[in-house]
Amino acid sequence: MLGALSTKVFGRRTIEIHDCIDSTNSRLKELALAGAEEGSLVAAETQTQGRGRLGRTWHSPPLYNLYFSLLLTELPPVESRPLVTLVAGLAAAEAVLMLTGRRPGLKWPNDLLLDGRKIAGLLAELDSSKAGREFVVLGVGLNVNLDYENLPPELKDQAGSLFMATGRRWDRIEVLAALLWHLENDLTALKEGRIDGLLRRYRTFCQTLGARVEIAQGADRIRGLAVEVDDCGRLVIECSDTGRLIQVNAGEVTLIKGRP
Ligand code: BTN
């Protein structure tokens, strides 16, 4: 592992690698509350309760993929914290581009797509429970060598992998090392306030921009044109019915075909 790594901190502190665990995010949170340092890492071959965004589960079969969580204790200023999610997605997109030469897309905020299929998801969980020590556990699930036949029926139309997009098998350690390098680079730039360049690069990957979308926020639905990702990382929607601009902080985006 260390041989492939070119980071300074990420993946070079406490490391745990499990054959099977409930969720790498849950385990890393325990380590963080016990004092683990910035850049600590928990990875697993398989997860029994992998968590996704918006309360979903993350399908985590063994052998093919990457499931890991990274601890961020040195956080950017409060006003740029919402950008951690987007910048982590940017880093994953840039790692995939560097490795494969294929340009992935990002569905706002950070679903990573290749050939229109979701190949990775990122879950950033902020913990402020311990006074004076806020931290973020950033969980990454990337489908590496998963093949179509390994997908459960409900994911067959939606999920992809590096293998499915490129036709070759990937060394998971090499992929992990590339992800950690881009995450360290881009999250350091965020901490140092180099936000304009990060957002400019994020927007070039973001396939949601210019699309007609529906955003689900609980029981509410917003329909309209995604016109901008603003400097706070919010998706700006021009509403179909009123023409008003609405800034969306969170929610599930669905692209709509035809006129909404
Ligand atoms: C999403 O819904 O798109 C985010 C998925 C995040 C999954 C990863 S897998 C490793 C880490 N541990 C978890 O329980 N979830 C994240």
Image (tube, grey):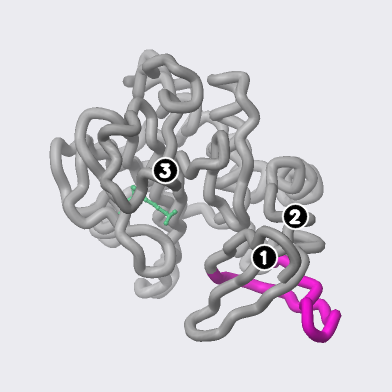
Residue that mark 2 sits on: 209
What residue range appears in magenta?
A: 234-251
Q: Sequence order check: which comes first, mark 2 or mark 3? A: 3
Residue that mark 3 sits on: 159
Question: Residue 106 placed where, x, y %?
Answer: 61, 46
Using residue 90 as the reference point, say whether residue 129 is left or right of it: left
Amino acid under disc 1: Val
Quadrant the N terminus occupies = top left
Amino acid under disc 3: Ala
Amino acid under disc 2: Leu
Q: Secondary structure at mark 3?
A: loop
Judge by depth and name the residue closer to the eye, 20 or 146. 146
Question: Residue 235 placed where, x, y %?
Answer: 70, 65
* Mark 1 Cβ inside 8 Å of ligand 1: no
Q: Is residue 31 visible?
A: no
Which residue appears at 56% of the width and 35% of the height?
115
How many other residues sit within 10 Å of disc 3, few (<14), some (14-19) or many (≥20)?
Answer: many
Which residue appears at 71% of the width and 71% of the height?
260
Question: Residue 33 placed where, x, y %?
Answer: 28, 61
Q: Secondary structure at mark 1?
A: strand
Residue that mark 1 sits on: 213
Using residue 139 as the reference point, say whether residue 214 is left or right of it: right
Using residue 232 as the reference point, say whether residue 10 is left or right of it: left
| Image marks 2 and 3: residues in contact by CB distance under 8 Å | no
Q: Is residue 214 above or below residue 42?
A: below
Measured Cα–Cα span from mark 1 to mark 2 = 9 Å
Which residue appears at 54% of the width and 43% of the height?
112
| Image marks 3 and 1: residues in contact by CB distance under 8 Å | no
